[in-house]
Image: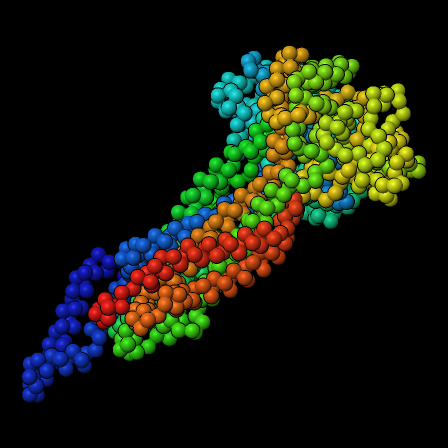
Amino acid sequence: MDWIPSIFRRRALYDDLSEEIELHIEERAEQLRGEGMSAEEAVRQARRAFGNRTLVEERAREVWQWPLLESMWADTRFALRQMRRSPGFTATAVLTLSFAIGANAVVFGVLNRIVIRPLDVPGAKSLYAFETAESQIGHQSYPDYLDFRARNRSFEDLAAFSITQAVLDAGANPSRIFAYETSGNYFDVLGIQPYLGRFFHGEDERGPNSAPYVVLTYSYWHSHFQDDRGVVGRVVQVNKHPFTVIGVAPPAFEGTLLFFSPDCFVPIVNRNQIDQGNQLNERGTRILFEPFGHLKPGVTHAQALADLSSIGSYLEATYPKEDGHKNFALVRPGFPNFFAGPLRAFVAGLMLLAGLILLAACANLGSLFAAKAADRSREVALRLALGSSRKRILRQLLTEALLVSLAGGAAGLLVSVLLLRRLSVWQPFPELAIHVPASPDANVYLAALGLALLSGFLFGIVPVRQVLRANPYEVVKAGPAGRTGGRVTARDALLVLQIAICAVLVTSSMVAVRGLVRSLRGDLGFDLRNAMVAGVELKMAGYTGERVEAMEDRMTGAAKTIPGVEQVALVNNPPLVAGGGWTMNVFKDETRDPKPSNVATTTLQYEISSEYFRAAGTALLSGRAFTAEDGKDAPPVAVINQEFARRIFGSERNALGRYFKTEDGTRHQVVGIAEDGKYFFFSESQQPAMFLPIRQTGPLNSVWLVVRSARDPAPLAADMRRKLRALDAGLPLEIETWTKGMDFALFPARMAAVCLGVLGLLGAVLSITGIFGMAAYTVSKRLKELGIRMALGAQAYEVLRAALGRALKVLAIGSAGGLVLGILASRVLAHIVFQATPRDPFVLAGVVVAMLLLGLVATWIPAQRALSADPLMLLREE
C-alpha cells in the first residue's frame, strides 16, 4: 500500500483497526459464553487467547507507516520526554559535552588553518613553495628568484615576497606599517581578486622604482581609512616617496605567511625607495621568502625537485661564491619547515589532549548513563516482559544519548565559533602584526558534528551489556537495587580512565607553568634585571650614511644623562627581542674559496658598541671587550660565544687570538669569548653567535639602545622618550623593559601554559563530577546499610571507608597511572617550553596535591550525607 496518501487518513484507519480488534474479542467472548462460561471469565479468556493487543495494533499499523522513520521519531519523542523528566542529568550531560566538543573544535580550527587548509586561495592543492633541503629555509636572492622563475619547467609561474617596515603618510597621522614587497605576478599566481580597485601585475614592472603602487589590506583600509572607497587613486607617502593606492585586498586574504598580517602590498621593484638599498642586484643577499607557484598538471614532486636541482647546480657553477644549494624540498606555503615542524607538533599534541578531554567526558557520561540505566532497570524489564525487543530498547537508549550529544555539540560549536572568530582577529603583538589563523569554516562544523555523533555513540553503548543481560523476571521480582560489591564494573574502569586523563592534563599543565617560571630565572646569557631596550628606526626617519653614526652617538649621550642610568650601549637586535638577530655564514680561516658549500657553520651576528657586554650583563669568559679603537680603520675583530668556539675551533681554549672568515672573505680575529645564551627562542638548542664592533660593520638602518639602570627601569621610559624626541621629534621609537621585549620569544611557552591549563581545568571538572557521581550513587544505594552500621556502633571513619572506599581507590589508581603517562607525555613540552621537565619535584608534589584536592572536593557532599544518615529514620522508612 502506498503510505503517502494514507498519512492524511491515518487516524481513521487506526480507529477502524482498534474497533475491528475489539469486535473480534467480543465475538470470541460471545462464543465462550455460549459454551457455559461466565461473562467475566469469557472476556478474560478471549483477551488471553488474542494476545498482546497493543503489540498487535502496533505491528498492524506498520502497514500504513514508514516503520523505520516513524519508530525513530517515536524514540526521539520518548527520549525528549526522558530528558525533560531529568533536567539535572540533561543539563550536566549537555554542559559536559559542550566543554569537551568546544575545546576540540577550537583546537581543530587552528589545526585546520595550519595543516589542512593553510591558504584559502583557488587551487590551493597544487600550490607549492620550495626550500633548501639541508637548512629547511627557502630564502632566495632576487636574482636567483628570477633565474628559477625563468628556467624552471615545473611551475606555471613563480611568485615571491619579502617583508619590510615603513612609514605610510596619507596626509595626517603617519603610521608605522608592515608591508609585503612582492613580485608583480604575486596576485596572479594566487588567483585572487581585489575587493576594490585592482592589483598590480607583472607588466607593471619596467625596472627599478617603476611601479609606485600600494594595495591595502582590508583590515588596514577599514581601520585607517574608515572604509572610504575613494581611497583608490589617492597618492600617499611611503618612507617619504609617493605611491598611489590602486586597490584593496579581499577581507579573507592576509598574505602568504601565516601568523603575520601585513598592512599593505607594494611591488618589490620599488624596494630601493622603501629600504634605501640596492639589494635587488645582490645575488648573495637572500631577502625573499620561499618562492611559490602552482605545479603544472601532470608534474610529479620528483620531477619538480629534479628540475629545481638542475637549476641549483647551474647557479652553483655559475656563481660559486653566492650559490651552493642544489637539494630542495617542496612545502606548502605558509611558513618554513624549521618553524612549521614544532608548531604542528604542538597543535597536534593539543589536539590529542583535547581528544583525551572528549574521551574523559564520554567516560563520565557513560558512567552516568550506566547508573541511570541501572535505576531504570525495572522499566526496561517491564518493557521486555510486555514484548518489546532488546534491539528496540537499545535503539531508544542510543537515541537519547545522541540527542544529548547533539545538544552538547551545538552548544560547544556555538562557543567555539565565537572563540575562533575572536582568536582570528586577536593580535598578541600589534607592533609585529602577529595574528593567530583560526577562522572557522565548513571543516570545523563537520568536525563538531562528527565528534557529537561519535560521543553519543561511545557513551550510549555503555549500558548495552546491562540491557542484553537483563532478566525481566528477576528484576521485577527483586526490584532495582543496585549492586555495590567488590566486583569491578565497567563504570569503575571508565572512571579510572577519566581520572588518568585528568592526571595527564594536570601534569602537563604544571610542567608548562613551571617551565615558564624557570625560563625567566634561568641563565639566558644576559641579565634582565634593571635593563631596558629602545628600538629606533633611523631609516624611516631619513638617516643615511654618516648621519646614522652621528645620530647613534647623540642618542647614546642623551640616554647617559638620565638620572639612574649606569650603562648605555648599541646593538643591531637584542637577543630574544623582535626576532632575536640576523644569521651569517662563516668559514674557517684556512678556507680559500668562501662559497656556500664550504660553510663551516651558520651563526648569529650581533653588531654592538663597546659598552654592550656591561650594559647587557653578558659575562666575558676570556679575552677583552671592544674599545673605541676598534673602528673602521682597525683590523677586524670579533667576540664569539662558547658554541661558536666549539664549532669552529674545537674548544674555547683554542679560540682566543685565532681567525675566521665571513661571507665577503674578511678575516676576523677573536679577541674575546662570551658566555652562551638564548637568542631566538627559549627552547632552542644552543646556537653559535658572534659579536662585531658596530663601527666596523657600517651604518645600521635600525638600532637598539640597551640601557642598564640602578633601579627599576620602567619609570625611565618617559625620560628616555623625552630625551630622544628632543633630538628628533620624528624618530620612530619602541621603548620597553627587556623582559617586556621578550613577549614574542615567550609567546609559545605562554600559549602552551594557557592552553594546557585550560585543558587541565576541564579535566579536573570532569574528574570531580565523575568521582562525585560514583560516590553519591554508592552512598544512595548503601544508605540503609550505612545506617545499620552506625546503629551497631561503627565509627565515622569506618562509615566513610565503607561509603567512599571504592571511589577513593579508583581515584588513587587513576591518578597513579595518569601521573606516569603525564611524565612521559610532558617530554614533548621541552620543545616548546624552556626548562620544562616532568622530573621537577614541585611538579610531582603539585600533581599529588591537586589530585587529592580533587578527591576531597568531589567526595565532600557524599561524605556529609553518609555521616548524617539517621539509622532510626531509615529503619522506620523500611
Which residue is more in the foreground, 332 or 294?
332
* Residue occupying the point 63% across, 26% down: 711
Which residue is more in the foreground, 453 or 551?
551
Report the residue that reaches farthest toward the bottom. 35
On-image quarter of the N terminus: bottom left
Q: Is residue 291 left or right of residue 53?
A: right
Residue 570's spot in the image, x, y percent?
Answer: 73, 24
- Residue 371 lies in what quarter of the image? bottom left
Which residue is more in the foreground, 870 or 285?
870
Residue 268's spot in the image, x, y percent?
Answer: 69, 25
Query: Can residue 480 be seen here?
Result: no
Against 638, residue 7 (above or below) is: below
- Residue 159 lies in what quarter of the image? top right
Q: Is residue 812 left or right of residue 832?
A: left
* Residue occupying the point 10% across, 84% down: 32
Q: Is residue 283 left or right of residue 46?
A: right
- Residue 208 lies in what quarter of the image? top right
Query: Can residue 737 be seen here?
Result: yes
Residue 295's spot in the image, x, y percent?
Answer: 67, 42
Against 856, residue 547 (above or below) is: above
On-image quarter of the C terminus: bottom left
Q: Is residue 694 left or right of residue 754?
A: right
Against 507, residue 782 (above or below) is: below
* Residue occupying the point 28% across, 73% down: 479
Which residue is more in the foreground, 853 or 750?
853
Residue 655's spot in the image, x, y percent?
Answer: 88, 38
* Residue occupying the point 56% across, 41% down: 751
| Coloration mode | rainbow
